[in-house]
Amino acid sequence: MLSKMKINNICCIGAGYVGGPTMTVLADKCPNLKVNVVDTNKKRIALWNNKDLSNLPIYEPGLSEIIGRARGKNLFFTSDVEESLKNADMVFISVNTPIKKKGIGAGQACDLRWVEASARQIAKFCTGKTIVVEKSTLPVKTSEVIEEILVSTSKSEKGKEFYVLSNPEFLAEGSAVENLLNPDRVLIGGDNQNAIQILKEIYLNWVKDEKIISTNLWSSELSKLISNAFLAQRISSINTVSAICEETGANIREVSTAVGYDSRIGKNFLQSGPGFGGSCFKKDISNLVYLCNHFELKEVANFWEQVLLINSWQKNRIYRNIVSKLYGNVANKRIAILGASFKANTNDLRESPSIEICKKLIEEEAYLIIHDPQVSQESLELELESPKGWEFQKNINKVFIDVDAIIILTEWEIYKSLDWLKIYPIVRRPSWVFDTRHFIDADKVKKSGFKFWQVGSCND
Ligand code: UDX
Ligand code: ADP
């Protein structure tokens, strides 16, 4: 009987931004479980196993300390998928699910090839009873696909039984460890109550009972999409307001603070910026739009699509503003880019507004000196898709020499304490500072001699 099933071995397929931190915290909180995190990317696995904890493949505050405690005890990173699956009682699927680039649903639907491959690996290598947990953000009804592949195997191979659960991850990059240790809620979707209970008991090792919600599979899958859609919608809303502020003399910080004081609205996710990035928001809303169109809910699809359109519009209008302030010409101008990651405290460049704005500036033949405290030259090369028109500068003191403009694109704390008085003498004048995050002290920048533009402020 499934209710008597004891979980000893866990396997997580995918050692990325979700699988890595989630399994690290789970292993640390459940010392009696053996957790194997598998990935076909051997280079990534080697980095997870690197003795030097500053070389982990992803940057997350607090993560390296926990890895230091758990790795080699009950937490293992390996590329031996077969061996890990053979022994697993529970398998988490945490693989990449990007938007399809080609074919039906291109630009909107999720590319499920990695999920399907994982399901086939599970069907092939797992033995006995296995609880399969989908962790990746997935389109609604993906569990059906996984279930169908698994059930067709269990019917033909005696002794194999699979139970599929949806357990979406709500962690945000940069605060992943904190979100995993103290989640607002843990959501478990499924139709087998015993399987739900078994997964719940694992979480009960560190999460309070009242924070663990169970639903049917599809409510769980849909809730994840909707949570992200609501968060993204708030950002697009406040970004529209930033443009109104720039025209009227209102200040976006003051407006969002005043609005956020209303407890029905709340103060989170009201920071105006260069648009949302990251691997989830665009993908999830695109999925939602695709789903709505599929069910012929045209008005609903249009409503959510607008969130994406505003996001592109915000990036574009900021970019145009920059070019226009630089006399409509950036060719051969040196421009300092502060921040490449899609937000602070992560080295992730996926869908980063900074990357999109950099690409456009390179196209206009500007020369960029890009600084970021955590990203690597190698990952920038992959994202920028251009070997020319930019350089990566790790040393913040060398970024500003002879630049015509400084654009702050990611809200890294170190940019707050820059000494503008010291920077001004080494730039080419007249020189601009563009604060696309509205997070540095406008007076200090202006007093040091720079021309200054800030999102959501009345500018020169
Ligand atoms: C998001 C969800 O927050 C998380 O619950 C889900 O599991 C995955 O997707 P993440 O993409 O890591 O997490 O980052 P998040 O903090 O949500 O920020 C997303 C983007 O929105 C970033 O580019 C950020 O700079 C931007 N943002 C966020 C704003 O522009 N303003 C805000 O007020 C908040
Ligand atoms: P996320 O942000 O959702 O964690 P990532 O792209 O960071 O996404 O990580 C997903 C990981 O899953 C990648 O490192 C990829 O190599 C791995 N992966 C994808 N498919 C498989 C598979 N079938 N078996 C093992 N690992 C896989």
Image: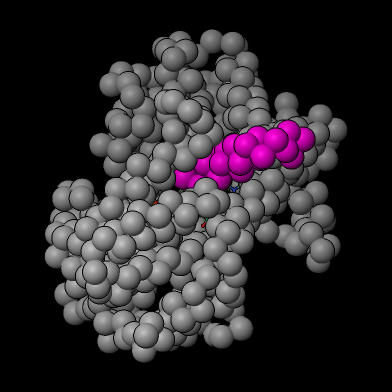
Left or right of 169 on screen, residue 73: left
Q: How many marks?
A: 0
Q: Is residue 277 within the magenta segment?
A: yes
Give the quadrant of the N terminus: bottom left
Left or right of 101 on screen, residue 251: right
Image coords of residue 207 (percent x, y): 50, 82
The span shown in magenta is 276-301
Asked if 390 appears above or below 436 in the picture, the reply is: above
- Quarter location, residue 355: top left
Image coords of residue 115 (percent x, y): 36, 49
Can I make out residue 180 in this image? yes
Q: Residue at x 38, y 38 (%)?
A: 371
Give the quadrant of the C terminus: top right
Q: Residue at x 54, y 10 (%)?
A: 329
* Main SS, magenta residues: helix
Q: Residue at x 65, y 35 (%)?
A: 293
Left or right of 81 on screen, residue 238: right
| Residue closest to the eye, 4 or 223 | 4
Left or right of 152 on screen, residue 195: right
- Quarter location, residue 250: top right
Which residue is farthest bottom? 4
| Residue closest to the eye, 167 or 442 | 167
Q: Residue at x 23, y 64 (%)?
A: 157
Image coords of residue 274 (percent x, y): 59, 37
Q: How is the image coloured?
A: one colour
Image coords of residue 283 (percent x, y): 52, 41
Can I make out residue 76 in this image? no
Asked if 83 appears above or below 304 in the picture, the reply is: below
Q: Is residue 184 within the magenta segment?
A: no
